[in-house]
Image: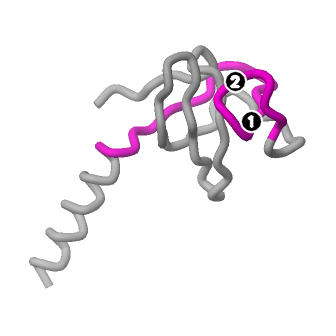
Amino acid sequence: VFLVGWGLEDWQLRQEAAEPLVVLAQDGVQLLSGNGPRFPARYETRLHPGVEARLRYDRGRWVQIELAGGEVGWVPRSAVLFAAP
């Protein structure tokens, strides 16, 4: 039982390091289908400050994030705050 618990905790720490937590800092941010303003919105709903997500990819001025519900999309890098390690 101890080894299973330790293995699960180790896996969780590796996942958090691979996909760190980010928090939206701007109001009205939309998840886009690509990494640029010309891509269409993935969803009509706009996001609000304080929404937490996991960083999936970082491409210069754009980051791809995954919300808790599994929604994935791109937002401007300037719209998010990166959690300290």
- Which residue is under mark 2? 36
Tell me, for residue 32, which label it has, or none: 1
Mark 1 nearby-residue class (10 Å; few <14, some 14–19, many ≥20):
many
User: Based on the displayed image, in which of its 4 quarters is residue 61 positioned?
Assistant: top right
Front residue (pair 8, 38): 38
Figure quadrant of the C terminus: top left
Q: Residue at x 55, y 42 (%)?
A: 53
Eye-nearest disc, 1 or 2: 2
Q: Residue at x 65, y 58 (%)?
A: 69
Front residue (pair 29, 38): 38
Where residue 80 sits: x, y (%)? Answer: 57, 23
Label 1 amino acid? Leu
Q: Residue furthest left?
A: 3
User: Based on the displayed image, in which of its 4 quarters is residue 38 positioned?
Assistant: top right
73 is higher (above) or lower (below) than 39: below
Q: Residue at x 68, y 35 (%)?
A: 34
Residue 31, magenta (yes or no): yes
Label 2 amino acid? Gly
Magenta highlight range: 17-41
Where residue 42 sits: x, y (%)? Answer: 79, 44
User: Based on the displayed image, in which of its 4 quarters is residue 46 positioned?
Assistant: top right
